[in-house]
Image (tube, coloured by chain):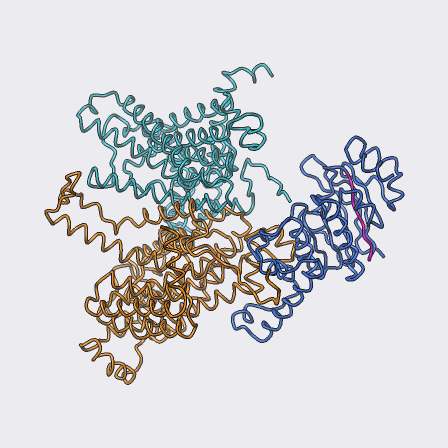
Chain colours: A blue, B cyan, C orange
Amino acid sequence: MALLQTNNVVKRFGGLIAVNKMTFSVDAGKIVSIIGPNGAGKTTFFNTLTGIYTPEEGQIQFKDHSLIGLRPDQVAATGIARTFQNIRLFGSMTVLENILVGMHIQLKQNAVDTIFRSKKFHEEEKDAEQRAKELMAFVGLKNVGNELARNLPYGGQRRIEIARALAATPTLLLLDEPTAGMNPNESEDAIKLFRRIRDEKGITILMIEHDMRVVMGISEHISVMDYGEKIAEGSPAEIRSNQRVIEAYLGRGAAVAHEQKA
Amino acid sequence: MKQIAANPVYKFFLFPIGQILLFALGASVVLSLATVLLAYLFKFNVTDFDLVERTMLLLPQVIINGLTIGFVYSTIALGYTMVYGVLEFINFSHSEIFMVGGIVGIQLMAYFEHIGVLATMNEYLVITLAILLALVVSGALAVTVERVAYKPLRGAPKLVPLISAIGMSFFLQDIVRLILSLTTGEFNVILPKFGTFDEFWKIAIPGMEEPLRIQTKSVLIVGVAMLMLVILNFLVNGTKVGKAIRAVAQDRPSASLMGINVNQIISITFLIGGALGGAAGVLFALKATKLDPFSGFFPGLKAFTSAVLGGIGNLTGALLGGLVLGLLESFSASYLGIFTNGAFGAEYKDIFAFAVLIIVLIFRPSGLLGQTVGQKV
Amino acid sequence: MKTLFSDLYKKANTGFWPIVIAFVFMIVGTVTLFQNPRSLGSFLVLMTTPVILYFMKMPMKIKVFIGLLIVVIILPVIGIKNIFILEVIFQMAVFAALALGLNIVIGMAGLLDLGYVAFYAVGAYAWAIFGSKQMSLLYSIPGAAPANAEFFLDARWFWLFLFLGIGLAALTGILLGLPVLRVKGDYLAIVTLGFGEVIRVLALNLDKPINLTNGPQGITPIQRPPLPPEGVLMFFRSFLEPLVGHEVSDAEFYNVMFYFLALIIIAIVIVVATRLEDSRIGRAWTAIREDETAAIAMGIPLVKMKLAAFAAGASFAGAMGALYAANRTFVSPETFSFQVSIGVLTMVILGGLGSIPGVIFGASAVTLLNIQILQNLSLYLSDLRQSDAVIPIINFAWKDLSNQLDPAKYQKLVFGIILILMMIFRPSGLIPAERRQRELGEEKE
C-alpha cells in the first residue's frame, strides 16, 4: 500500500490553477522525485501536502490519516518532515538548538518540568542532546553544535536543515530542491546522504529537484509536473524517453541536461 | 462609454466625487437602518420615552457629526495607507505629523490675532493660509522623519522600523511640548475666535419640529477634505509621479530596475501623506478648537483603524474606512447611553474603534476593499 | 584611545583585580552613602558593583557573597537612613519583572505587545478592589463613600492575591490572545495597544453601573500585607538601630519588607524566565520569532505557543501589579497609561531584546534615569534659576531659563530618543542576547 496517496488535488489562487487534479502516490521505502519546469506547481504541491495551503478539492491520505484540513504542525505530527527551497533555518539559534527544535513533537517536558527542572526534564534534555549530536555526525557536520546557524557556509546550512528534519523522526521526508546551489562534488555527497537516510533510517524520501544528475542518479520513481498537472511518471529510464517530458523541457535549459545524460 | 471613462474631467473629478458621495450616503444609510433596528430591539429597556422616535429624531445630527469627523479620519488614513502600500510599514508617528499640522495652523491664526489683523482678514483666506502652512510644515516634517529614523533601517526586520517609529512618535510629542512650553509658556493651543464658522445653518425638514442644524465649519471640513481627496486621486492616478508610486508599491525591485528612483519616490510618498495629515490637522483643530501635543494620538489610532478597515494599502479603502469609522463613533457616542439607559455612555466611543479593528482583523484581515495576499514560501 | 581602554580592561580583568575593584566600588559607595544618604553619585557607585560582578571574571562564590552583602545588608541599612533608596530599588525590581515578562513576548516570541500595561493593571486592580473597602462601596457614587464602609478582606489575603494576580493576568493574556494572535506581525502591535487602552478606559469608567473601580479617582486605601510578628521585628531592631542610629518605625519596616518582597519576586521571575528560555518551550518561542513557517513545519503549534508566551509574560506583570497596589495603597487608571507600556518596551530595547541580563540592566537604568537622574537634573536646573549664574560664552543668564524646562516631565522624550537611537545604532541592545553554549565534547579547532 502507498505511504502517501493524493487524489485529484486542486489548488487555486484566484483564477490561477497552481495544482490541477494531482493524483500521485509514494510507496514506503522509496526515493521519489517530482520534476518539472519552473512554475510548474511543484512547491505549491509540497505546501498543499504539508498543510500550508488547503486544497480546494481532492484527498490526501498519509498512512491512515487524511491530511486535508490539518494545520502544518498537525501534519508534521503525523510523521512528515520537510526542508525548504530557500533554506529556512533559525539563524540566531545555535546549530544544536535548531536540531532540538526539530524534536519539538517528541519532547514531552511541560511548563512545570521546565520551571522546576524535574528529573524528567534533565533526562530528556540529555537524551535529546545526545541524539542531536548523532544527527550532526550523521549528516557529516563536526564541531558546529555551538555555532549560530546563520554563520555556517551554505552547504553546512543545507545539512543542518536536513538534520533538523530528521530530528522529528519522520516516516516521510520532503526535500525541496535539496541540492540547489551545490557544485557537482557537493551534489554527489548529498546523493550519498539521501541514500543513507533511506537505507539506514528507513525513511521514505520525496523530493523536488532540478539537477538531472541527482534526479536520475537516485530516484526510483519520477513524476513530472507541468502547468500544475502531472504529465508523466515512471522509472528514470521511462522518463528519459518520454516524449511529453522532452517537449515540456524543450528550450528550457534542462533539455540540455537531458541530452547529456542520454 | 469608454470615451466617457477616459475623459479627464470624469476620471479625476466627477468619478471620485461621485464615489465619495456614494460611500458617505451608503455608510450613513446602512448604519442608520441598523440603529433603527436596534432601537426596536432595545425598546423594552427604555420606559421614559419612545426609543424609536428618539432615535429617528437624533439621526440627522448624528450622521452629520459622523461624516464630519469621518472625513478627517479618511484624510489622515490616506497617509497611513500610502506609506503602508509602499513600505509595508505602519508609520506610527503619522499621528504626530497630523498633530503638528493642527498646532501650526492654530499658531498661524493666533499670530494673525496677535498682530491684530485676524478680525479684518477674510476668514476663508485665514483658513487657506493655515492649511497651506500646515501642508508645507507637516510634509517637510514627514520627509525629515523618514530620512532620520526610517531610511537607515530599510531592510531590517519588520519590528525594527516600527519600534523606531514608536520612538519617533513619543519624541515628537514631547519635543513639540517643549517648544511650545519654552516659547509660549504652556502647551495647550486654543483656536482663536474669528469668522462665522461657529454659526449654524438651519434647514427645516418637513414633519420635524426642530430644524436640522449644520455648523458652517462642518460643511467647510467636509468640503476641504473632499477637495484634498480629489487632488490626491489626481496625483496618484493622473501623474507620472503617481504611476511611479504605484509601481514601487507593487514591486520595489522591479520598479528600481525600470529606472525609478525608489528613495525619491518613498520621500514623495511621505511628503504627500504628511501634507495630507497636516491639512487634516487644521480641519480637526477647527472642530476640536483646542489642541495639545498629545491630541494626535487617538485620531491617529482611529485613522489607522480606518485604513485597516478599508483594506490597508488601498486608497479608496482608506476613504471608506474613515467614513464608516467616523459614523460608527458618532453613532456609538450618541446612542450607547440612550440604548443602555445610561449604564454605558459616550466615554466608550474611543474603545469602540478598537473593537471594530479587532473584529475586522479577525474576520476580514484584508479589510472591506482589500485583497488577500498569499503568503510566499 | 579605544585600544588603550580595552587593554586596560583586559589587564584589570585578570587575577585578583576584579575582586579588588568590586570591593572598592562597594566600600566607597557604602561609606559615602552612609555619610550622605541622598547622594546620587554614591548610589551610582554602589549600583555599579553588581554590573562589575556580572561582567568581570571572579569565582562564583565571591560574586554571590558580594551580591548578597549588598542586597541583604548594605541596601536595607542605608535604605532605612534614606527611604528613597529602597523606593528606587523597589521600582527597579517592579520594572525589571515587567520588562522580563515583556521580553518573553517580544524578545523571545517576537510578538510586539504595546498593551502590556493592561496585565499589570489587572493584577493591581484585582487586589485593589478586594483589598480595599471598594467591595462595600459597589452601589455608592464615587467620592460619596459612607463612613461605615469596611475592608472586605483581611490584609493577610494579599498573599493569595499575589497568586490570583498571576492567574488573572495570565487568563487575561489568553483571552486577549485567542482572537488577536491570528493577526499578523505589525498589526498585532496596534491591536494590543488598543487592548491596553480598553483596559484603561474600563478602569476609568467602571464606576457605573456599579462602582467597581471608583473611576478616575482611583481606589484608596488598599491594605498592605501585615508586618511580621513583633518578636521578629524586635530581633531586627536589636541590630538595625545601632547601625542607623535611630529607632526604626513601622513605616520603615514596611519599606524594607516591600523591598525584600520585590527582590524575592524578581529572583523567582529571573529563575523562571531563564529556565523557560532554555527549554523546549523557549526554543519554540525563538523558532517562531525567527521563522514562523519553518517553526510550524517542525510541528510547533503557533497559536498555542504564542498564547503561552502571552500568558507567561502577563503573569509576571500580574504579580507585580498586586505588589505595586499594596505598596502604594492606591491605584488609579493613570498609573496604567500607554506611556508605561512604552517605558517597559524602552527598557527591553535598551538592554537587549531576548537578553535576560540585558533586560534587567535596561530596566534598572531606565528606572534610575526616570526617578533619580531626571529628577536631580530638574532640581539642579531650578537651583541654577535661583542663582545669578550665567552661561559664559553665549551670555545667557540661568534666571531667564523658562521654568517649563523641567527634565523630569520629559520622560517621553527620553524614551523616544532611546528607542530611535537604539534601533539605528544598536538594535540588539547594550547587552545583546547570547545563545547558551553547551559542553558537547566537540574539539574546538
> B94 left or right of A172?
left
In this view of the protein, which residue sits in the foreground, C386 or B106? C386
In this view of the protein, which residue sits in the foreground, A125 or B53? A125
Is residue B211 in view? no
Quadrant of image for the C terminus of chain C = bottom right
Where residue B318 appears, as percent x and y from the top left, is 48, 34
Residue pushed farthest bottom? C231
Where residue B41 appears, as percent x and y from the top left, is 48, 47
> B363 left or right of B298?
right
In this view of the protein, which residue sits in the foreground, B59 or B320? B320
Count the numbered circles shown.
0
C118 vs C150: above or below: above
In this view of the protein, which residue sits in the foreground, C440 or C215? C440
Where residue C408 appears, as percent x and y from the top left, is 25, 52
Residue pushed farthest left? C388
Is residue B360 in view? yes
Hey, which quadrant is residue C120 in on the image? Answer: bottom left
Determine if the magenta segment contains residue A127: no
Where residue C105 appears, as percent x and y from the top left, is 48, 56
At 40% across and 67% down in the image, what residue appears? C266
> C385 left or right of A139?
left
Hey, which quadrant is residue B223 in on the image? Answer: top left
C379 vs B335: above or below: below
Region rendered in magenta? A28-36
